[in-house]
Image (tube, grey):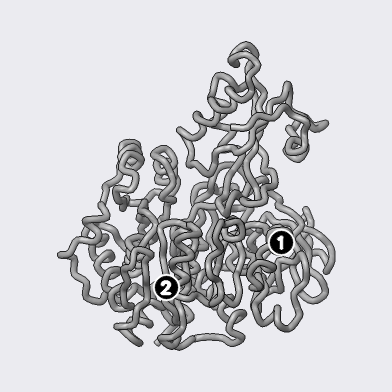
Amino acid sequence: MGERNVNLATDLERRAAEDPERIGLHHDDGRAWSYAQIDAEASACARALAAAGVERGQRVALYLANGPQLAFAIFGAWKLGAVPVTISGLYNGSELAESIAKTAPVLLVADDHDGEARDAALAAADLPLLTAAQLAAPGNARAHLAAARVQGEEEAVILFTGGTTGRPKAVSVTHGGVQESLARLARASKGRPGPYPLAPATVPPNLVALPLFHSGGQHTLLFAFHVGRAAVLWERFRVETLAALLRQHRFDSLFLLPTMLYDVVHAPQHPDLSSVRSVLIAGQALSIHLRRQFEQAFGIPIVMNYGSTETGHIAGWTASDMKAGLWKAGSAGRLYEGVELEIRDGDGGALPQGETGEIVVRSQMTRGYVDDAAASGELVRDGWVHSGDIGYLDADGVLFLVGRKRDMIKCGGFQVWPEEIEEELRAHPLVRDVRVVGVPDERLGEIPKAIVVREPGAAPGDDDDAVAATLLAHVRDRLAHFKAPRQWAFMDELPRSEAGKVRRDALAAAGAREAEA
């Protein structure tokens, strides 16, 4: 029989074969699809892509609003053996065009959620368009199409995430790496290896809280099918939507970002979480204060998960760990079974337990960055993925995070790169110099703060608020809204090190003239 097919569409196909009529996907608008219907829609997408000339191994850019159609398109690409390039539906035209240029897809699949951005990107790229309506046309054959057989090291999806420096990087993620990561997390949460039978019909579905263009959203959906559960999609997070879905589905667990947790805690009316046994938090640091507020308000334990797009699931705490009293305050979690991890010094040497260094993981998760060979070479070396995170392991195999090697800002779960914002701000005639740093925020974890040196004589008087408002509008016209600085400060010059480099660490605490915008 040979090696098993590790195509990421195989768990969906297995569930459709086990119980075709079982509901496998819900949307917050009330629509629902059985596993067989999901498979049929994905098969139709695969045929539409093939008819448009897409071949196995080729990349397809998906610029779709978060929802079922995006899920069908991703699975359809996998069935064909093609590679979905999942681009944020929040990107504007220039960001979409840049994403296309970095990843070299053969086709753009887009809906009308931002037709202006779509058309601007198409004007900048010589790329054919397949509309969402054409992809889902009623005439497309929906008979089951078996997923192409792939090897573990084959490229599965391109995701945009942080590299060691600079603008967003396009990460090549493999079929085998994702399957390995899903199996690792499932084994930790269930206490035994798979394969797992289809869950009883009385078991509630899993909420996919993050968007499907995000690795967290994709992994949540894949994890649900991997362990035999249904999934629920929504267009975006709102406390009111969460409350309504809780009443309908009675979720027994939630996977949320700290930002979402903040909104739940501070909502005028708390949602009914009486069915929820635990909340999994990932994506950014969780403040002790917010954790305490949530657990006191709801009496539900929070469990953590550490990992990244490049490494997969690495460490975390399960509900069983919490009950057994294994949890350690301030930790990222216990290493999952099968994880091979080292803490290394600046020269690449392995450090002993208790010493702090870069977290490095042996993983087949990623083939590197497709748009930056130098950064890719730094990321993956001899099969080891260098996370860029700094931490240490204790004697019990529990991982503690100390900080990040890179300057990337995590704002509400979204990744923001200072250099990208700085590049746009430097183009403005009011700006002589600028640096963007991450500063703590109770709700969002971190927010971008811009420290600006104004061009002499170019600013309208000494009104910092007016300058900040002008620059904020400039950034919002050019970048996605979550990248816009939330705080502004003005200095006569930026603090520099003895080597002449601007010190980002000193900027966040610098006594600058503040302006709110």
Marks 1 & 2, CB-CB < 8 Å contact? no
On the image, the x and y values in percent for residue 123 come to: 31, 36
In the rendering, which numbered label is found on residue 359? 1
On the image, the x and y values in percent for residue 333 come to: 70, 70
SS at mark 1? strand
In the image shown, does 202 or 18 lie closer to the viewer? Answer: 202
The residue indicated by pointer 2 is: 248
| Distance between mark 1 and mark 2 Cα atoms | 41 Å
Q: Residue at x 30, y 45 (%)?
A: 127
Query: From where the camera sits, is residue 107 visible?
Result: no
In the image shown, does 386 or 450 lie closer to the viewer? Answer: 450
Q: Residue at x 37, y 70 (%)?
A: 26
Above or below 511: residue 16: below
| Crowd tier of the residue under label 2, counting other residues whose Cα lies within 10 Å: few below 14, some 14–19, many 20 or above | few
Q: Amino acid at mark 2?
A: Gln
Image-based side of 226 in relation to 37, left or right: right
Q: Amino acid at mark 1?
A: Ile
State the quadrant of the C terminus. Answer: top right
Above or below 498: residue 228: below
Q: Quadrant of residue 514?
A: top right
State the quadrant of the N terminus. Answer: bottom left
Query: From where the camera sits, is residue 197 visible?
Result: yes
Q: Residue at x 21, y 56 (%)?
A: 134
In the image shown, does 476 or 502 lie closer to the viewer? Answer: 476
Mark 1 or 2: the one toward you: 2
